[in-house]
Image (cartoon, helix red, strand yellow):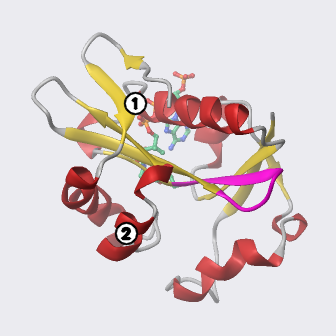
Amino acid sequence: MTSLSVGTATKLRPATLADVVAMEVLMAPFVASGDLLPRSNYDLCRHIKEYVVAETPDGSLVGTGSLKVYSTALAEIAGLAVRDDQQGRGVGKALVEALLVDARALGLNEVFGLTRKPLFFMRLGFRVVEKEQFPLKVWADCARCPRQHACDEVAVALTL
Ligand SMILES: CC(C)(COP(=O)(O)OP(=O)(O)OC[C@H]1O[C@@H](n2cnc3c(N)ncnc32)[C@H](O)[C@@H]1OP(=O)(O)O)[C@@H](O)C(=O)NCCC(=O)NCCS
C-alpha cells in the first residue's frame, strides 16, 4: 500500500496485528451509534491485510478503513472510522484515497460503500446508486446488522 501523509503529522500505513486492539477501541463508539457494523477480534485478525490505519506522531491510531474485495471487478470500502476529535481534518479523505490507490493497483473496476454519510463519499467523487445492483454476496454482512429490517444506509459507488 502507498503511504500518504495527512497534513504534516498524521501518517497512513498498512495495519498490522499489533493494531487490532486499538482498531477495536477506535471503532467501538461508531458501532454503538450504528454507523459501523460490529467486527470481532477474529474477523479483524483474519482480514488485517485489507486495512489501512492513520497514526499520529505519538503512535495513536486515529483512523482506519478497509478494502474488501468481492470479485475481479468489485470491492467495498468498509470499516471506515476516524476518531471523533480528529474528524474534519482530512483523515477520512486520505484513508479513502489510499484505499482507492490499492483498488486501482489490484485492477478493480468499481468500489462501493454502504453508508449513512453519503455526502462524505460524494465529496470524493462517489455517486449514489441503487443497492440492488450489487451481487447477493455483498449482503452477507447484513445478517449480523442490528438494523437489517430498518436499513438506513445509502449505497455509493465510484468507477475507477
Ligand atoms: C465519515 C468519516 C470517516 C469522515 O472522516 P473525516 O476525517 O471527518 O473526513 P474528512 O475531514 O476527510 O472530510 C473530507 C471531506 O468530506 C466532508 N465531510 C466529512 N464528513 C462529512 C459528513 N458527515 N457529511 C458531509 N460531508 C462530510 C468534509 O467536509 C470534507 O470536505 P472538503 O474536502 O470539501 O473539505 C468520519 O466522520 C467518521 O469516522 N464517522 C463515523 C463512522 C462512519 O460513519 N463511517 C462511515 C461508514 S461507511
- Residue extending farthest to the left is 58
**What amino acid type should be assigned to the residue bearing mark 2?**
Val
- Label 2 crowding class (10 Å Cα cut-off): few <14, some 14-19, many 20+? some
| Viewer-side residue, 129 vs 63 | 63
**What amino acid type should be assigned to the residue bearing mark 1?**
Val
| Viewer-side residue, 125 vs 64 | 64
Give percent across and percent down for residue 21.
20, 60
Q: Label for residue 115? A: none
Residue 59 appears left or right of 133 = left
Examine the image and state in which quarter residue 78 appears: bottom right
> Which region shows up in magenta?
69-78
**Magenta stretch containing residue 73, yes or no?**
yes
In the rendered image of this protein, does residue 146 appear above or below residue 32?
below
Q: What element carries label 2?
A: helix
Residue at image point 31% right, 24% down? 11
Examine the image and state in which quarter residue 22 appears: bottom left
Give percent across and percent down for residue 141.
59, 78
Q: Label for residue 31? A: 2
Residue 52 appears left or right of 9 = right
Q: What element carries label 1?
A: helix
User: What residue does disc 1 label?
Assistant: 91
N-terminal of the pair, mark 1 or mark 2, is: 2
Residue 141 appears left or right of 29 = right
| Viewer-side residue, 38 vs 41 | 41
Residue at image point 49% right, 86% down? 146
Disc 1 within 8 angstroms of ligand 1 (CB): yes
- The answer for how far apart the CA atoms under marks 1 and 2 are is 19 Å
| Viewer-side residue, 85 vs 93 | 93
Give percent across and percent down for residue 48.
40, 56
**Magenta stretch containing residue 147, yes or no?**
no
Give percent across and percent down for residue 79.
47, 57
